[in-house]
Amino acid sequence: MKLLCYSLLGLSSLSATAAFITYQDGITNTSNASGPSWVSGSVMFLDIISNYAGAPDVSGATGFSSSGFDLFEPTGGNLDITLLTWEIGSMSLYQGAGTLTLSPGVATPGFEDYRYDDASGTAPYNLNFFYDGDLWASGYITSFVTEVDNNSDFSAVGAGSGYLAEATVAGADFLAEVGALTSSTNEFSFTADNFSPVVPADPGTFSSVGAINFVPEPGTTVAGMGVLALGAVLIRRRQR
């Protein structure tokens, strides 16, 4: 597994009116390496988790730049995007009907399909945004799919989707702007690039960079946007 952050080229091309935030210093923690066969004789991790003994405090990343957000523009809120962080909690490898989980071959790609059941908005949040250490908004990452080119490829790419459910008083302006950008759905898609193992053992830690795209389309299109974003990342990757 691996997680978090994204390639802006693919995201900015998804919608001319979308806003996106690019991230750096992404860290994703994983555990339970007892899934299907994966890269170079190892196995897929069954869980993305927020912490474990000896791991960094959270899975998450730090803001690097933004486009389309007045809060971070000099003529708007003039806030510092590098003080915006997001943290990600648990997700599990999905192996039910319709799963995209597939072990890679010598010359064929493999997929990891991670999902989280938001229980119609009643489950514990697995997503938080902070600004300068203060909680701004919370919600859910509901799906995340990664891919490697073959079973010798240590760096993965991926795409997923989620939404924000509520904000604190401090984050009210942030959630309001997200709502305005997404036709009040508060949904986003994301792509992830350059997932590389820092600690590949079980539990494992992966680094990443990338971006989050706040899309103004109805909720039913967000997952499709994520698939398109994954395709864009893969095309760019194979052109390198």
Image: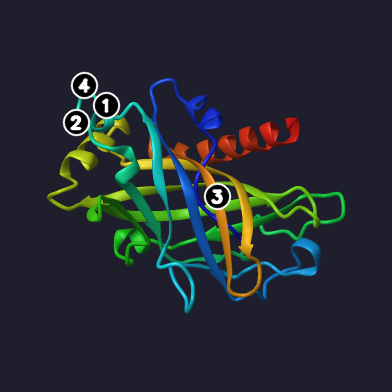
Residue drawn at the location 22% of the way across and 52% of the way down: 166
Is residue 190 in view? yes
Disc number for residue 81: none
Q: Describe the element under mark 3 as helix, strand or loop.
A: strand
Left or right of residue 39, residue 231 in this image: left
Left or right of residue 146, residue 23 in this image: left
Residue designated by label 2 = 77
Q: Describe the element under mark 4 as helix, strand or loop.
A: loop
Residue drawn at the location 45% of the way across and 55% of the way down: 142
Disc 1 marks which amino acid? Glu
Is residue 98 in view? no
- The mark nearer the N terminus, 1 or 3, is 1
- Residues at marks 1 and 2 touching, judged by CB atoms closer than 8 Å: yes
Q: Quadrant of residue 202?
A: bottom right
Disc 3 marks which amino acid? Ser
Disc 4 marks which amino acid? Thr
- The mark nearer the N terminus, 3 or 4, is 4
Residue designated by label 4 = 75
Residue designated by label 3 = 208
Disc 2 marks which amino acid? Gly
Q: Residues within 10 Å of mark 1 (few under 14, many from 20)?
A: some
How far apart in space, not on screen, are marks 2 and 4 (Cα)? 7 Å
Q: Residues within 10 Å of mark 3 (few under 14, many from 20)?
A: many
